[in-house]
């Protein structure tokens, strides 16, 4: 499969997945689980073990193969599992996905990355790798900063001489801040939207 074909397929899957998530959100909204804690607890009562496992797996997959908008899955974790456990499941899934992404890039190299991003994007971020020390700092700052292209940079890091221990510490210490920032922003945004729709 060519890189253009694989990227096109991922784009199609992203659109399809987004439509499915929108339809599911409408269904869940009609069930009342977004507006009633009791209904949400009842809905999740028989999903206490399998629910978190499936959700964590989804988070891992969406990091490695970006067919689900990251913000949507972060919001889902907080809505369905609450702010604390939602954060934990988001954190575990995203960190594991980031680790897998690093090793895939390190093992399969440039061709793997070009299946997921364009050559123009690849070259744009590869320029930062000329100096390893500077790239390490750049990578750490981007992992902490919201809206940074984390997944692309995780793959690029796999192509550099960055030690895995360095990469791991950056991911483990940097990801909580962005996950918390996204989660809080999305939750308050969703609540505002629900109130707006309810008027």
Image (cartoon, grey):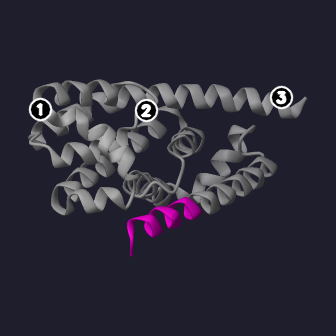
Q: Is residue 9 magenta?
A: yes
Label 3 residue SS = helix
Label annotation for residue 196: 3
Q: Position of residue 96 (x, y in %)?
A: 29, 50
Give the quadrant of the C terminus.
top right
Marks 3 and 2 sit apart, C-alpha to C-alpha, by: 25 Å
Marks 1 and 3 sit apart, C-alpha to C-alpha, by: 48 Å
Q: Are marks 1 and 2 in contact (CB under 8 Å)?
A: no
Dividing the picture into quadrants, the one containing residue 1 is bottom left
Label 1 residue SS = helix
Q: Badge 2 is on which residue?
A: 179
160 left or right of 46?
left
First in sequence: mark 1 vs mark 2: 1
Q: As rendered, which of 115 and 168 lies closer to the eye?
A: 115
In the rendered view, would you say 157 is above or below 181?
below
Q: Could you tell me which residue is drawn at 39 percent across and 71 percent down? A: 2
Asked if residue 94 can be seen in this view, the reply is no
Front of the two marks 1 and 3: 1
In the rendered view, would you say 50 is above or below 148?
below
66 left or right of 98?
right
Q: As rendered, which of 78 and 49 lies closer to the eye?
A: 78
Q: Could you tell me which residue is drawn at 83 percent across and 28 percent down? A: 196
Range shown magenta: 1-13
Please tell me how crowded label 3 is: few (under 14), some (14-19), or many (20+) other residues with Cα within 10 Å: few
Label 2 residue SS = helix
First in sequence: mark 3 vs mark 2: 2
Q: Chief secondary structure of the magenta span? A: helix
């Amino acid at each position: 499969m060519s890189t253009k074909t694989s990227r096109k397929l991922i784009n199609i899957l992203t659109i399809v997945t987004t439509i499915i998530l929108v339809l599911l959100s409408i269904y869940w909204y009609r069930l009342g689980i977004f507006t009633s804690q009791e209904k949400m607890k009842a809905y999740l009562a028989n999903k206490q073990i399998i629910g978190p496992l499936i959700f964590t797996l989804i988070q891992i997959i969406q990091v490695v193969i970006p067919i689900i908008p990251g913000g949507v899955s972060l919001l889902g974790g907080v809505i369905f599992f609450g702010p604390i456990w939602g954060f934990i499941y988001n954190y575990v899934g995203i960190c594991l996905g980031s680790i897998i992404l690093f090793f895939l890039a390190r093992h399969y190299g440039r061709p793997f990355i070009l299946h997921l991003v364009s050559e123009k994007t690849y070259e744009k971020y590869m320029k930062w790798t000329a100096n390893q020390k500077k790239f390490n700092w750049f990578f750490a700052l981007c992992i902490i900063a919201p809206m940074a292209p984390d997944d692309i940079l995780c793959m690029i890091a796999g192509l550099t001489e960055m030690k895995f221990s360095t990469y791991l510490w950056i991911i483990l210490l940097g990801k909580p801040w962005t996950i918390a920032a996204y989660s809080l922003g999305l939750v308050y945004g969703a609540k505002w939207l629900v109130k707006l729709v309810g008027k």
